[in-house]
Image (cartoon, rainbow, N blue to C red):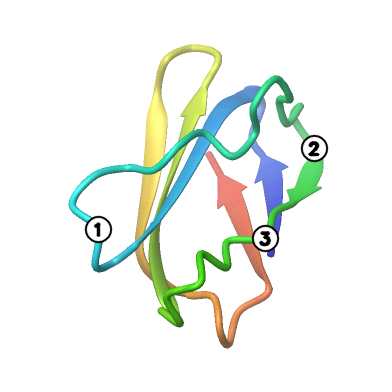
Amino acid sequence: MTIINDTSFTIMYLYGSNVGEDDWQEDVLGDDVVQPGGKVTVNFDDGTCYCYFDFKAVFDDESETIRNRYNVCTESSWRIYE
């Protein structure tokens, strides 16, 4: 799945958890970040066969955006806008 940062802020952390989980899983970016206008491809296949995931992006100004119940089986990208 491709995450596209169409904001003026850097994405510092990116979390994705299948809807069956109660907590956010580990930051999938690790030491990387996604600059404004940038993108990153991430494999969210966690072996559970879930199609629906919740995502959270945390920006360098400490704001965040959450996208709930995103279908990774039918969608190939998440474009984050301001």
Quadrant housing residue 62: top left
Measured in 3D between alpha carbons, the distance from the residue under mark 3 to the one under mark 1, in whole angstroms, is 17 Å
- Mark sitting on residue 43: 3
Depth check: give the residue in front, 81 or 40. Answer: 40
Which residue is tagged 1?
21
Q: Amino acid at mark 3?
A: Asn
Q: Earlier in the sequence, mark 3 or mark 1?
A: 1
Residue 70 appears left or right of 20: right
Say whether marks 3 and 2 touch (CB < 8 Å): no
Q: Earlier in the sequence, mark 3 or mark 2?
A: 2
Location of residue 48 in the rendering, given as x and y in whole percent from the top left corner = 42, 75
Measured in 3D between alpha carbons, the distance from the residue under mark 3 to the one under mark 2, in whole angstroms, is 20 Å
Location of residue 33 in the rendering, given as x and y in whole percent from the top left corner = 71, 25
Where disc 2 sits, the SS reads loop
Which residue is tagged 2?
37
Taking the view exactly as shown, the residue that stands out farthest to the front is 47
Quadrant where the image shows the N terminus: bottom right
Q: Is residue 60 above or below residue 65?
A: above
Q: Amino acid at mark 1?
A: Glu
Nearer mark to the viewer, of 3 and 2: 3
Taking the view exactly as shown, the residue that stands out farthest to the left is 22
Depth check: give the residue in front, 12 or 80. Answer: 12
Q: Is residue 17 above or below residue 48?
A: above
Quadrant housing residue 41: bottom right
Q: Residue at 24% across / 44% down in the picture?
A: 23
Q: Amino acid at mark 2?
A: Gly
Say whether marks 2 and 1 touch (CB < 8 Å): no
